Amino acid sequence: MPLYGLTGGIATGKSYIDRCFVDLGTHLIDADLIAREVVEPDKPAWKKIVDYFGESILNPDRTLDRKKLGKRVFANREDLKRLESFIHPEVFNRENELVREIRDKDPDAIIVVDAALMIESGSYKRFDKVILVVVEESIQLERLMNRDGISKEEAIQKISSQMPQSEKRKYADYIIDTSRTREESKSQVEELFQKL
């Protein structure tokens, strides 16, 4: 069975699209959840991050202070690339393990891997087809400000640290636009699911 990658920029509505796919019986692997697991204290990626960025990016319980680390890497592309180089290989290994486990139990399973940075990292090449979630830029900005309780400037900085949606479209086999209602987005998922 083909392996599908699902991606999209920050605040494009990927989480809702994920839920729609799961409701239809798709097996979903969330790279963001895996990325949180691989940076737990004393794991290999965590050690590399602390060695590079220093202990000032840790909370008292030795977990990463994601806000502090995020501010630093979103302001410095070199630091962002370095952070990704520590995390991505660990995430890919875990994704591959999960795909094997699912396929062992259900060889006909439809598997979608949600990874926000699959195009930027080049990991989109691992998938048979790429599904891209897009949204109008003004809506994306508003969603991000509301979701994270941040200023317009901070939201713009976060969005601009990612590859533009227009560029991502070049890599997509399927596009789901979440600019309108949830019902319309869900309909697009149902239509695509029939093709998968």
Image: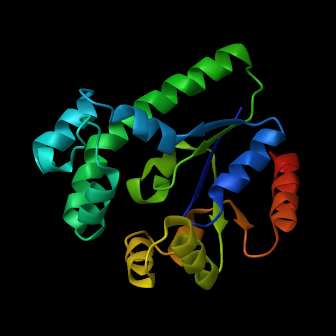
Q: Locate residue 132: give its quadrant.
A: bottom right
Q: Is residue 62 left or right of residue 138?
A: left
Residue 40 in sight from this viewpoint: yes
Q: How is the image coloured?
A: rainbow
Between residue 21 and residue 105, name the one nearer to us: 21
The residue at the point 29 percent across, 49 percent down is: 65
Which residue is drawn at the image coordinates 43% and 80% (left, top)? 151
As displayed, is residue 75 above or below residue 189? below
Count numbered badges in the picture.
0
Q: Is residue 174 above or below residue 166?
A: above
Q: Position of residue 170 (x, y in %)?
A: 57, 70
- Vertical placement of 80 versus 62: above or below? below
Residue 93 falls in image quadrant: top left
Q: Which residue shows up at 29% across the image and 38% down it?
A: 63
Q: Where is residue 40 shown, x and y percent of the image?
A: 33, 32
* The C terminus lies in quadrant: top right
| Residue 165, percent from left and from top | 55, 73
Q: Residue at x 65, y 22 (%)?
A: 102
Q: Nearer the viewer, residue 7 or 74?
A: 74
Q: Give x and y (percent) for residue 112.
A: 66, 41
Tell me the quarter of the image containing the N terminus. Answer: top right
